[in-house]
Amino acid sequence: MGANLGKGGVVKNKSCIQCPFHGWVFDGETGNCVVSSDNLSRKQVDQFEYHDIKQSKNIDGNYLYKCYSGNVNLKKYHVRELNGTILVWFDSRPEFQDNIPYEPFDLNVKLDYRGESINFVNCHIQEIPENGADIRHFDFLHTKLFTFTSLIKFEWKMLSHRATEDDLFEVMKHKHEFINEFKMKVLKTYINDSNKKYINVISLDSYVKIFGWKFFLFNATGFQLGPALVYLFLKSKLFEVTFAQSITPLKKFNIRVTHRIFASSFLPYFVSAFMLYSEVQQLFSDMLIWNNKTFGSKLTYNLKTEADRNLISWRNWYARFYEGCHEFEQKQDALDW
């Protein structure tokens, strides 16, 4: 009858879920409507449909007609529980719903989980992951380390490259040997032939400028995996930190952004807390823009600059994740909410 099983539904015998409305039971493994949580035989039911509810159409005085007899089942979704996050695979195209083209990263890092931040943004979903490829906005928007002074600033140097490019390892090579060794190891660990077409890679050097003096802080090797996952592997002489970002569309133009931080066990908690705080402060700078901007399909670029060439390349790469969305949204005109 359309009840939300996630609101009041009850798990039965560890493998079934019971509807909170009428008590019908569904097998979690197959999705089938079953007799009970103790009897997984398929329940036989009759299904009725409106002739045309929009037009209040009836035939022989009946607005409904019997369209099916037999068993019914729920839509099933592939789920992964990784890095403290529950991830659900959804594709607007039915033929891809059961064929996951790539797996999320299992970080399995020897780092301690230190916390998370959750924020809500009102914008198009693409705005958030696009940040990672928008080189120029780092220099313009993300220079402040502290809001109360401009004497201490960030400076960034960024590269962006698709994982499918033959020269990826050459482009990502770093001048500091200890970072280069770490970066090459991370690239080889997480990129493979099956997932590389769905990955965009960034390398981000962070410097801090104090009264005009510039000091290297860390390098971040970043992976944009699919439309909604980002992994940042930070390396410096003093620490190793990993950020895992996920974005979840709650409804159109309403996005939940989650950052989780994993840090070296010897790193004091107040340091990792400050790093998470700093990440969120940078996010707030972006949110001020995202919450008040429009998303356009016709955009202006200055192709004389490497930054804009990278950005248009990234947008070409990201556009693949819209395949099937138009057809899916057209079906939303039906009353199957």
Image (cartoon, rainbow, N blue to C red):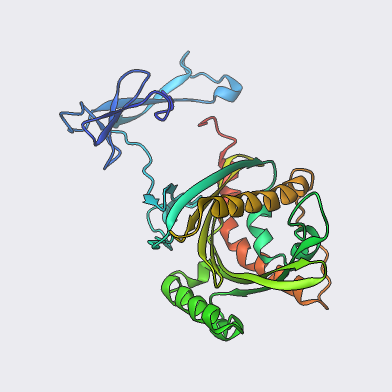
Q: Nearer the viewer, residue 326 or 203?
A: 203
Q: Quadrant of residue 57?
A: top right
Residue 125 visible, this orientation: no
Q: Nearer the viewer, residue 237 or 248?
A: 237
Q: Is residue 148 above or below residue 203?
A: above
**Residue 306: % across, % down:** 76, 77
Q: Nearer the viewer, residue 133 or 178?
A: 178
Q: Is residue 196 above or below residue 72?
A: below
Q: Quadrant of residue 130?
A: bottom right
Q: Nearer the viewer, residue 77 or 204?
A: 204
Q: Is residue 208 above or below residue 56?
A: below
**Residue 228: % across, % down:** 55, 54
Question: In this rendering, would 322 be left or right of 51?
Answer: right
Residue 161 visible, this orientation: yes
Q: Quadrant of residue 236?
A: bottom right
**Residue 174: % across, % down:** 59, 82
Question: In this rendering, would 84 be left or right of 168?
Answer: left
- Number of on-image labels: 0
Q: Residue at coordinates 49% horizontally, 81% vertically from top-left?
A: 181
Q: Which residue is situated farthest in the top direction here?
A: 61
Q: Residue at coordinates 18% horizontally, 33% vertically from top-left?
A: 40
**Residue 213: % across, % down:** 78, 72
Quadrant placement of the N terminus: top left
Q: Residue at coordinates 44% horizontally, 52% vertically from top-left?
A: 113
